[in-house]
Amino acid sequence: MKKVLGIIALALMVSVGRVYADEGMWLPMFVERLNYVDMQKMGLQLTPEELYSINHSSLKDAIVGLGSDPMPRGFFCTGEIVSEHGLLFTNHHCGYSAVQKLSSDQYDYLRDGFWAKNYGEELPAPDMTASFLIRMEDVTKDILGVVTDDMDYQDRQAAIRKKIKEMETAASEGGKYNPVIKGFFEGNEYYMFVYQVYTDVRLVGVANESIGKFGGDTDNWMWPRHTGDFSIFRVYADKDGNPAAYSKDNVPLTPKHHLPISLDGVQKDDFTMIWGFPGSTERYMSSYGIDYNVDTFYPMIVDIFGKELEVMEEYMKADEHIRLMYSDNHAGLANTWKNFIGQCTMLRKNKVSETKVALEHDFTKWVNQNGKTEYKNALPNLRKAYGDLGEVAKFVYYPNFIANIGAAGIAGQFGSYYQAYLDKDKDAMEMNLMMLQQMNVDEFFAETDPQVEKKTFAEMLKTYKNAFSADELPEIYSIIDKKFKGDIDAFTDDVYANSIFATPESIKAFIEKPNPKKIGKDYAYIMNTSMMDVIMNHMGDYRAAMQTVSENDHVFVKGLREYYAATQPEKSLYPDANSTMRMSYGSVQDYMPADAVHYDYVCTANGILEKYVPGDYEFDAPKQLISLIEKRDFGVYADDSGELVVCFLSTNDITGGNSGSPIMNGKGELLGLAFDGNWEAMSGDVNFEPRLQRTINVDIRYVLFIIDKYAGATNIIDELDIRKGEPKPLRVEEEKI
């Protein structure tokens, strides 16, 4: 769910007494040259060296990319170091998977929360890594230096991949660092990012799900928001401060820099900056790409994911064990599902395609007037390629999802073994059987429930059938019609009663005493292969169209950069997000989403009381929290008017991957954690909407209130560098005589 382009950065808009949205996710190494003067005017008090330095500690050293792999090619979230002992804050939903894996029916940390009182109680977070950026550098000349004019697309990409691998290996210094080289501006520039990746990350604290996910899917992407979206981890290292696998001998990391925390809160127009690892934007996408997404791609995903979610929720609401088991999977699907609904809605409502058409008209006029023949065919080629994708996409995406559901997905693992049997290749059969014997069968069924899997299997088959005409349906539907009178539920019952691949016991029994003939007659296997046949019959056309898109995106964006340089030389362009460190800046602002509707820039704990529904799946809240709010027992975390601010809005430019990013004031002090965008600007990944686009941030005072007043985890509070400025003097106007 990512990949292409959008419009271009708007100039910073500043008027007397007001600061507006500033578009752009900027590479920190260019902040001094491109952004620093404007940031100073808006309220930044740090020097360029204090923001980004490769020779001294700087703010960038407190920003952490959270991943699940030692090779940091992409991050699912951002975190920030907030103490000299490696303490890390991120969002609740960023730590959700790790907390779910650490939970059990006996210790359900999602439901009950978790707070370690000391280092010894902290829990190793499964599959979580913390990456620190050491440096970034422009390697465009090195990478593109291997490309020649006579190369076709395939040769060009092969040469680039080879050079990237060579340079990454050299920069690793024998494994000390983890370098990653990525393309920018659709492969017109390349930068190298050198990381140190820490794999020993431990859970320190997390609030109940009814706090950290308050409002559930209903409130997701919405304002006002009353979600305590934070969790706390700690990064560990060996005694010398180097990355090391988990060990009881490891010690908390002493970071190069950690963020102090401000209790001063926010006021309208206050300067804000966010640093993090935004995952993907498509700001340079053509109008043809937008139309394809809105008309074809997004609706397919909404259809498939929506049905999966219906099944999960039916069982999750009825059974606590199933709720815990599927909570992580459900959260990911639900977020993407609602995101795509929002993008479809707002791309149309905000007329983004029309905006791009106007830009493309001006670009084409410039191309023709200036004889820029290199760029002449880019847009026509994109129009045709996206048209081709629109014709073929459903024959790739639908069967790909269906083929991997439940027993059918497991059956696909046995395809090579069965093909070797058909080919009468005994050596290949023996080799494939050895691989099957080494397979962890139980892992296929971990975190799954038979009744949920069976119902999903049936509903996905129905979803597929509804999306295609009768003459487009694969072989498996003929079997369902002939053998089961078209009854998909009856077919599903048969699969889960008789298929080799329906239970771990039947799979293990088959591997122990294999009879390959049975595979070809197994309905789960036939279902998998019939779906794969559909994919393979259309994959050639799909890949050709995708390659044409990639080739012409490269040319189009190259042309756009030249167009802007010639027509608007004052405009600074930023590259699309690609899970590399970026900085964005803006201010605290309210907004008006519709006629006569005004949204304030803060929301308070009063809203929790207003939304609270005891026992509700999404809007229940702990009785202790409700009591604290009703008593207005907010301690030092109340604002000047005695209210407890839960979340606030800013104009910073962010996207997925920025979840957990620190939002800071001009002194580099932590004000809160970014965790969402707003519904009215769901088109923002493709086209920035300065009037509407807002970032939703959980206020750090609410975070500390939950840690301190609600959880009583004062050991965590004591570790933080908490600051509060002097009270602002009251302004007294001189009386006129």
Image (spheres, rainbow, N blue to C red):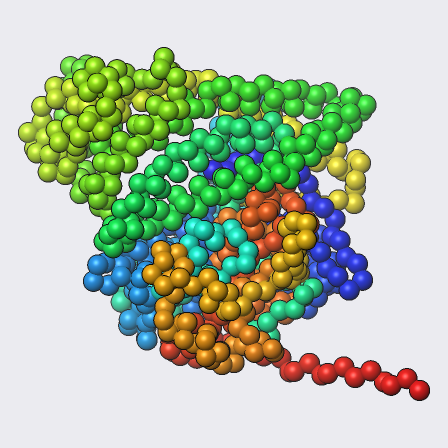
Farthest-out residue, left: 513
Question: Looking at the picture, how far across and down is residue 520, in whole percent?
Answer: 17, 19
Q: Is residue 284 above or below residue 135?
A: above
- Residue under the image location 58 percent in, 70 percent down: 669
Total marks in image:
0
Question: Looking at the picture, how far across and down is residue 717, in whole percent?
Answer: 44, 77
Front position in the image: 407 or 196:
407
Q: Is 584 on the left or on the right of 339, as rendered?
A: right
- Residue under the image location 54 percent in, 58 percent down: 224
Confirm whether residue 410 shows in the render.
Answer: no
Q: Residue 503 appears in which quarter of the rendering?
A: top left
Farthest-out residue, top: 471
**Split into 4 quadrants, where in the image is the C terminus?**
bottom right
Q: Is 490 on the left or on the right of 257, as rendered?
A: left
- Residue under the image location 79 percent in, 35 percent down: 566
Q: Is residue 717 above or below residue 378?
A: below
Question: Looking at the picture, how far across and down is residue 93, in whole percent?
Answer: 41, 55
Farthest-out residue, right: 737
- Residue under the image location 43 percent in, 76 percent down: 628
Question: Looking at the picture, how far across and down is residue 537, in whole percent?
Answer: 38, 16
